Amino acid sequence: MRGNTFGKLFSITTFGESHGVALGVVVDGVPAGLEFKLEDLQELLDRRRPGRLNVTTARNEADQAEVLSGIFEGKTLGTPIAVIVRNTNQRSQDYDKEMARPGHGDITFTQKFGHRDHRGGGRASGRETLARVAGGYFAGLVLKEVQFKAFISKIAKFESGDIDPFSTQFKKLHFGDPEKEEEIEKYLLDLKKNGESAGGKVRLHIRGLSAGLGEPVFDKLKADLAKAMTSIGSCVGVTFGIGEDFTDTPGSVATKSRENFGGIEGGISNGEELVMTLFFRAPSTVGQKAKEGRHDPCILPRVLPVVEAMAKLTIADHQMRQNAYQI
Amino acid sequence: MRGNTFGKLFSITTFGESHGVALGVVVDGVPAGLEFKLEDLQELLDRRRPGRLNVTTARNEADQAEVLSGIFEGKTLGTPIAVIVRNTNQRSQDYDKEMARPGHGDITFTQKFGHRDHRGGGRASGRETLARVAGGYFAGLVLKEVQFKAFISKIAKFESGDIDPFSTQFKKLHFGDPEKEEEIEKYLLDLKKNGESAGGKVRLHIRGLSAGLGEPVFDKLKADLAKAMTSIGSCVGVTFGIGEDFTDTPGSVATKSRENFGGIEGGISNGEELVMTLFFRAPSTVGQKAKEGRHDPCILPRVLPVVEAMAKLTIADHQMRQNAYQI
Amino acid sequence: MRGNTFGKLFSITTFGESHGVALGVVVDGVPAGLEFKLEDLQELLDRRRPGRLNVTTARNEADQAEVLSGIFEGKTLGTPIAVIVRNTNQRSQDYDKEMARPGHGDITFTQKFGHRDHRGGGRASGRETLARVAGGYFAGLVLKEVQFKAFISKIAKFESGDIDPFSTQFKKLHFGDPEKEEEIEKYLLDLKKNGESAGGKVRLHIRGLSAGLGEPVFDKLKADLAKAMTSIGSCVGVTFGIGEDFTDTPGSVATKSRENFGGIEGGISNGEELVMTLFFRAPSTVGQKAKEGRHDPCILPRVLPVVEAMAKLTIADHQMRQNAYQI
Amino acid sequence: MRGNTFGKLFSITTFGESHGVALGVVVDGVPAGLEFKLEDLQELLDRRRPGRLNVTTARNEADQAEVLSGIFEGKTLGTPIAVIVRNTNQRSQDYDKEMARPGHGDITFTQKFGHRDHRGGGRASGRETLARVAGGYFAGLVLKEVQFKAFISKIAKFESGDIDPFSTQFKKLHFGDPEKEEEIEKYLLDLKKNGESAGGKVRLHIRGLSAGLGEPVFDKLKADLAKAMTSIGSCVGVTFGIGEDFTDTPGSVATKSRENFGGIEGGISNGEELVMTLFFRAPSTVGQKAKEGRHDPCILPRVLPVVEAMAKLTIADHQMRQNAYQI
């Protein structure tokens, strides 16, 4: 009830502060007998790591995953899988100097818990998403036939049109219009120099989803996906299908094509490609790190594996819910 | 796990098909000793009722609430409160003729359950929101000091600016700019005649919220509110604070004012006014009813009490979660 | 979290005070397309009803079930099924005179909720088990191949040996040794006259259970069955397999026969017949009703359908949990 | 839903196989600001460790706790606390030779998961209780004013009478009649030599419990305690208050003294001392270890800290549930 668990039948419980001993995740509900590859898990964690792109923050954690349980002789046991990543850089001196960052949780954490973990945000740090990505790896194991692809459709003033992400050859930033990446990268490096940062949009496509996932009333697939995505720190909004365009499209036009609904009707997947859009705000840029240009001016490239992980976790859980009732 | 329960400490479990015997809700977690007034509950249900406005659907259910349990001598007992509303119009002949309506769940329900309840949508009908409104009444009893106000900020092409809804004198439609209501109503009646319908936006303000509500990681207040709102049938998106504007506002500008965050930082309420925006699609207009002009061209006025109810339910639950840890 | 819901994938939420308007249950998780027969449900409720046996209480409620939702054209819809039973006798005058009954909850309810519903126990009354029995009926629908049989193995000083309940021709009381029923009935009528009451033991057999139900650690099948049974008001203990005999049987002897374990090993069903024993205390006999001989001197015959219902609910839930992970 | 989490508001999620890399627990719901002492936690783990008594198994794990998160500068942060204990002895050669042990889960695990972790029982091993004890330590932090005391009231043929455990000077085995310990120890060593083992009873007293804990219907305090205790591997039964004596005590006698009910009435704590009895079977003694005399002939002394831990976890959770509704 402290909200460190996500999912019901397929669930993850995460722990760890950004500057504590370790972060980790307990993945429960993974069926027995699935093949596990540490290198695949590690690759996902590396995608999330800051420092991969020039434009992301310099903090270069190793983020080496260690599996403590649930795997034996290369296969899942059906028991809970615990994965931890030790924090190699636990110094909190840098952060002691930091002032509370608006929008970031520094103030509200104090309001909630009566104290503040002044070590780089504690649980509020984006570093907790590492555990989500690890969990998402295992969700992926049970969804072999489903493809998840998130890409950046907007960074600051740069926007890409609607594309088919499964046939697009993305570049480093995974921007929807790869041609513009050079220009964007220059723009972001400029932001960084100025201690500035940018927000944007991410578009998520899910292909190969079976029809019938999601429950009719409160646990609609869109509702659970909306929760999954807005639980990511800087996600400030989410829309489904044609999204905001729905608000001024007459009913007859909107319903002319099933595609407009983005793969969900009546809250339940219809077997078509699921499409949703996420809005992200720019990271807070107050404090010493920003002043010294050590901050991340745009977290969107790093957020993509997190978005995909949250989608996998949500879908795996709903798939199992649907299985449960097949008698 | 079939998603008919919402909330953990303060929860509602709803039941009933649109053309079955009755709809109802079991509200669990209401503390003992709170004063109950049937007329207040009934008034909320009436606000949600179709037919209240000229522009809404002609189906004129009485929606008379009957309390079966949990109330004794005008006070809550602390035991579960069951409220039912009998369906006076259980004929499904009208609906038999209806074709499956895109976006509405008619097709996906069949995909999920292997059959279709052809009586006006069954659980997929907007009529299930009646149970949410009843539940929201009781959530309101435990949040005496918090004010919830939802209003329409956009209908089709009509938009209102940012307003303070607590000091605005709303008219019948609760549109953000009351001066425009006459024009909008004319527009909607035209839509109705043409078998057409409109979408729009709803803005929700919550005032008087205590700081510290919401949990740091998965159960952020924004995540649970996003789920609550997108669980409403035709809600296709949700944003917080300045919403989409965040996506092209530089970090230094966005963080300049705490107000931009809409009362939530790091996923936790900061004690300021909470502000969020909901996107709604136009109702599906396929079928006999639309042809005969008996459909509702815009459900937004009726959706307002539902939005407020879902907000109350979410906040009451989080308030209790926060209480639990005060030792 | 007020504990009015039992089960996770297959769940019941119950409501209603013994002297309120109605009692009821919302059954969630029933798959679509199962055949429903009101008369079968009613028969189970009648078995639980006081007044069926001479020796049970005179309060003769009709306990007529009304289905409000989830059933259409004689089949389950997959949506929540609400069943209510109206209280025909809502007078609480009798009870106003009653003093608080030790062991019964009258005092602790006041301690918990800060007030007392003086109408015959409110939620603490055995009448709430009616909703469990209704829920159990639907659990039975998904467990067609499993047989549940509870019988009385002890009443006061009368004890029956181990029997096969599936091949026993039970009499009215469902006592394990039918020959002794006449004697027991006489004994109970004597108790009644003296304002006295008796406890005893119930033995439950479950046949046809598939192997592999139950989870390895906290949700062992025996743990969830223990909870299910001790949640019945007057159940004061539960044992599995050879029960107390285990406490002085050497390991080598105990493990010689799988039968000793009563169908559960390592917390998981092994495909053999499940056997457990429940201990019940005598009902409290303080108060006007006992004085006037209108009380029930032994609730065991009426408790049998409740025990079977709780077993069905627990097994159905675990069966669905097991289904969920079959990918 | 794989049953590796216990508790709702105060919860533990445990992981780890007996011969895997590590066992661990994530404790969620611990309020912020409580003082943490590693030595106190370690002491509890040591009490559970085999090898502490002559009569327990020779496997001498260090069981050194490492805290990964949730603690900062000697205080709880309010974030999830992860504690792990690495397995120093991961060799599974011994166990490869073992045959499946009846009652132990070796067979049912294969039935459930379709494979068998042949390394000493995997999750079915008693070693998983280590994580429960660690979790119980933290539950104890929020229940400073409540005292928990479990002792052995029966080993094989040896029985102790009813005692006040809070004023008893226990010896090594914590048997209810300390005078008999020498004799019992001799008896157990004899059992060990013969590859034999013994069961028995544990009695648990809880003093200082506030009135009003437990919920009226399904989550009665006795129901949740029954589940907690029977979730311990070799616990085969549980009774409350005078337990089995209830089954042949007339109502008027049973209700004469509130003490008979063992501190729970109507499922809710009444503020008196809570008393319950647990039945344990003898450990399985099939296999190489028993043959070589390396097995534990009686696990009861080691089970006491596990029983106390499960009680603390259950009570802490219910205390928080009760807090939640104090508005």
Image (spheres, coloured by chain):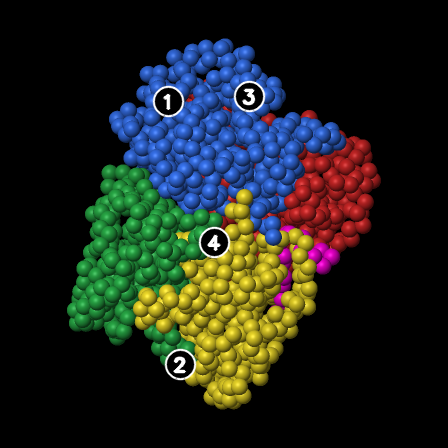
Chain colours: A green, B yellow, C red, D blue
- Looking at the image, tell me whether mark 3 or mark 1 is earlier in sequence order: 3
How far, Cα to Cα, is label 4 from label 3? 49 Å
- Indicate yes or no whether the magenta region holds residue A110: no
Where B117 falls versus A64 (above or below)? below
- Mark 4 neighbour density, 10 Å: few (under 14) some (14–19) many (20 or more): some
How far, Cα to Cα, is label 3 from label 1? 26 Å
Secondary structure at badge 4 equals helix
Q: Chain of mark 1?
A: D
* Residue type at numbered disc 2: Thr
Q: Are marks 2 and 1 on the same chain?
A: no
| Residue located at (31% from left, 61% from top) | A285
The answer to which of B124 and A60 lies nearer the viewer is A60
Q: Is residue B310 visible?
A: no
How far, Cα to Cα, is label 2 from label 1? 73 Å
Judged left or right of residue C156, residue B3 is left
Residue ID for mark 3: D153
How far, Cα to Cα, is label 4 from label 2? 42 Å
State the image coordinates of residue C324 (x, y, percent, origin top left).
40, 50
How far, Cα to Cα, is label 2 from label 3? 75 Å
Residue ID for mark 1: D286
Residue ID for mark 2: A249
Q: Chain of mark 2?
A: A
Residue stretch rendered in magenta on the structure: B72-87
Q: Is residue B214 visible?
A: yes
| Extreme-right residue of the structure | C292
Q: Chain of mark 3?
A: D
The answer to which of B262 and B214 lies nearer the viewer is B262
Judged left or right of residue C207, residue B260 is left
Q: Are marks 3 and 1 on the same chain?
A: yes
Tell me the number on the disc at residue A111: 4
